[in-house]
Image: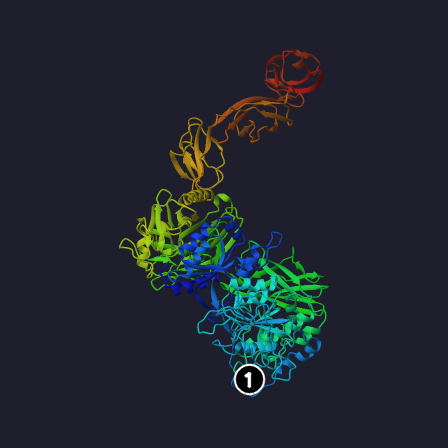
Amino acid sequence: MPTLSPLQRCSLCLLLMCLLHIPLLYAQRPEADFGTKTIPNKVVYRLKPQQPRLMRSGQENGMRQALQRIGAEQVQPKFPAIAAKQAIATARQAAPSADLSLIYELKYGTAHTFEEVKTALMATGQVAYVEPLYIREPFHQPNDPASDSTKTTQYYLKQVQAYGGWAAEKGDTTMVIGILDTGVRLTHQDLQSKVKYNYADPVDGIDNDGNGLIDDFAGWDFADKDNNVADDSPWTGHGTAVAGVAAAATNNGTGMAGMGYNARFMPLKIFSSHPNGPFGGYEAIVYAADNGCKVINLSWGGTSYSQFEQDVINYAVLEKDVLIIASAGNTNADLDFYPASYENVVSVGGANNKDVKYKDHTYSYKIDLISPSINIYAPSAAGDTKYGNVGGTSFSAPTVAGGAALVRHHFPDLNARQVAERLRSSTDNIYTLEGNKPYLEMLGTGRFNLKKALTTPDLKSIRCTKLAPVAKQNLAAGKTIRFAAEFINLLAPTTALEVTLTSLSPYVTVKQSDVNLGSIGTMVSASTEGKPFVLKIEDNAPIFHKVYLRLGFKDGDYESFQHFELVINPDFATLNANNLRLTLNSLGNIGYNGLKMQQGVGVTYGEGASMLFEGGLMVATEAGVVADNLHNADWQNDNNFTPLHLTSQHFETPQADQEIRSLMETKVTGHPLVEVKTVGFAWADAANQDYVIIEYQITNRSSDTIQQLHTGLFADWDIGRYTRNIAAWDSQLQLGYVYNPEVQLPYAGIKLLTPEQQVIYHAIDNIGGNDSTVSVDDGFTNEEKYKIISNGTSRLRAGGKTGNNVSHVVGGTSINLAPGQVKTIAFAVLAGHNLEALQQHAQAAQQKYISIRTGPLPVATAFEACLSGPAVVAPEGGSNFNFYADADAKNFLGTGKYFTIPSTAQNTTIYAANADSMFSSMAVPMEIQVIPAPKADFSFLTEYPQVNAVVQLKDRSQDATAWEWDFGDGTTSTAQHPQHAFQKPGSYNVKLTVTDKLNCQRHTISQTIAVFDTAPKLYPNPVRDYLAITLTRPLTADASTAPMLQLTDVTGKAVSVTFLSADNTNFKYDLSTLAPGVYFARITYLGKTFVERVLVQ
């Protein structure tokens, strides 16, 4: 971190206190400087609920060491009386909604900054927050010169129907309004009879009531710590006027009438009598709440938010049932002033005598109602009988506070929140007036009406207590988001309540807008349950854009509204799934959104404060230009990247419990165009809860090869007292780490996870370094950045022996990145309670990254090859593999989608590992089997094949996968078991050729088949030499299977013939010796006889 003055440090921390968390429903508006000064060298902090018990049991060493380290000069409970009461509370009591006994005030020396104090206390893990103490200012506004300065009438009493209200209720002296202001002239004729005195502690120099305040008989000065509540601050007269508007004596025939009629007021001075003196507003709130005030008026404020102040408000309202009324502000802008804009406060804006917003007054969706605020006739501190006209929302608030006291008295069974809703729900509509139309619903429900607040029966009021996205959703452009809502009915029961959600922005469309809550009883809660609202964020939504959502309520004649703020399409997001939380933006930064330190959590570990001041990606090439978004020589973000896709969160992905992704490209002169995809990973399980992983995929989008690509992750750590940090390097783990040698604070570091051609590490002394390093405290030039990122492991330690303001960079250099080629580099950002723990977390991060960046195991497969032929091994389960000759993957064979073995003589095994990702998988055996040669064989299944009859053939080959049949008659087949019909009788040579599955070898076999005619026939006829008889089945040794021929001439004389030959299908006789002529052949065959005429030529 750079060296800053104490004032600069304090200013920086004021920003850090207002950290914005996405999604936001109550985001704070841009800070103005009104009421934001702080008390020097003092902070207020709140312990976590379990810490007092731990301290009483002796487990407070961490806090004691932290207080010693920051030189705490004084530590005490902020509210000692409450702390004492809480200490004796029984275990049976429910935990308070706002436990002020946990809040402490700390005074520290000028040698330390607010940031150092906050860091030390938050690092203990025992503290919920650390904040400065703000000095708020009264909302006083001088009279408008154009107003009628001679006007002395109280016009506003008629305007708010005070007279009608007084007819219904005048209250009594038991109703006390706390006037927390600049003091009061107690002797004024319209105030002296209305003071609430503490008769338990008369002015005698003794603390008679034992509350720690001596003689707080007529109030107390919480700024100057005495009992003098005179109106003598730099804003003299403000408090006197406020007290008069709220509670001046009424119906006494003198001066003016206070709105509270018979109510009394408690004068509590909170502004010092001395310029630049202290402020005691919130101590006074606690005192007023503890001492009987039913209404408190706060006509002051500022623009900065404080959780401490909200805690005090919650205590007064939720624990002590006090109604708090506050001024909304005197700035003509859409602003949120505090305390008016805190939860559980009624915020009162200002109007003129025509119910139109006064030109110089604030408007906001957090204003609840308005009341007249100009030319307000009020007592003056200048004399006991003096009056004057005053203006500002400082004086509209007490009109409502006085009326609220009467409402509380009239409805004694209502609590403070319910009375607040009666005030809101009974106003007069002002939005039909032309001057108010630009401020629709930004002036609350309307103008305060006392009569209606007191007399209107069955007022209704529904308030939404929570409107938030359902868990694990990303408020990015183009997303559809589900919102859940919770409600409470504070007044009369509803019968058919309908709630409608609308968007006031063109960038958000409500897809599911309505929910019917029906009947809800008084003080009963309801929710949307399983029917959430659904919103669509438009694709063209601007970055980090604030939008307003409106809830409309309707139940019969009852109609009301409520507004919420929502920040959409943020350009940063936070990994928060485990002990280490880290913000990533869309421009390469880690920790914060560049130098906008109110946007992001930094890097936090456990319950501690952020340990990081600045961090981010650095990318450089051999040309010497570094692309980054770190601070430059002018202490501005370098802005060298253009976002292509903003950060988006993803939950329960296949690789992690939470991911953040973004895409950007370089935009700097002299640097080749590269595209960077960022993916952040986080896991919630115990083994992986102390680190996150950030992976950068860098693509060369230029047309030239990048000769050298230097990539590093820079971090300026601030652990405890940032000037006492040491940076070091663990070469074995490739881990750069930083620690504070003075105290037991966490170690933090960056581990390189990917194999690199050259590892980068440079430890930096931010101030006071020698020529071996650079100084980033006085600005960070491109030359300095290039020096630390382009020289490998160039400096291994920073901080000396006792520590310094240090930072470091961890990274790697790649050679020859071709156009379109992608280089992946990954880091673990991690923390641990000591070095050993940090190293263990580094090893766990390495194993986790290997597991998510290792491809799946290839499928173990057997491959077949031809004898002496090539074998191709093509594994499944990936697209790129490394091949090895051995199971230990030591004998590398090659890489690719497949691997070819040139010649295979026998069965063999090689091993394949998936190489699709950063790391290869385990090698899996791939068996190569040499297939045997095929052997053809077949048989005929038909006993006596005949012409045109189907002959069935049966393949009996071995190791064959393809068949080619030749039936000898000019026809073929590729069936394994074909059928065939021969058209003519005779003997046919049937041939079968078979092939193995790889078409390596073929084998052929032939067999002869005899095909018989269907009936015996004589041929040729006429005949010259022989006469043949066709057979219908094969001849056998049995003579009965042979035909017999008897030949006669035309005279019937038998003629002798000689047997000539016989084959499978024919039986032949020699007729060559016969004389030409006609003969008759008598054939006997297979038990049948037939005669046929034969012509011998």
Residue 823 can be seen in this image: no
Q: Quadrant of residue 1011?
A: top right
The N terminus - image quarter: bottom left
Is 1080 left, or right, of 751 in this rendering?
Answer: right
- Circle 1 SS class: loop
Is 403 left, or right, of 663 in this rendering?
Answer: right
- The foreground one among 970 and 411 is 411
The C terminus - image quarter: top right
Q: Quadrant of residue 842?
A: top left
Q: Residue furthest bottom?
A: 150
Q: Position of residue 80 (x, y in %)?
A: 52, 60
Task: Please say if 506 is above or below 765.
Answer: below
Tag count? 1
Q: Position of residue 484 (x, y in %)?
A: 61, 58
User: What residue is pinned by disc 1?
Assistant: 386
Task: Please say if 394 is above or below 915.
Answer: below
Task: Please say if 1067 is above or below 834.
Answer: above
Task: Please say if 1019 is above or below 265.
Answer: above
- The foreground one among 279 and 814 is 279
Q: Position of residue 29 (x, y in %)?
A: 51, 67
The type of residue carrying mark 1 is Lys
Residue 74 can be seen in this image: yes
Q: Position of residue 597 (x, y in %)?
A: 44, 61
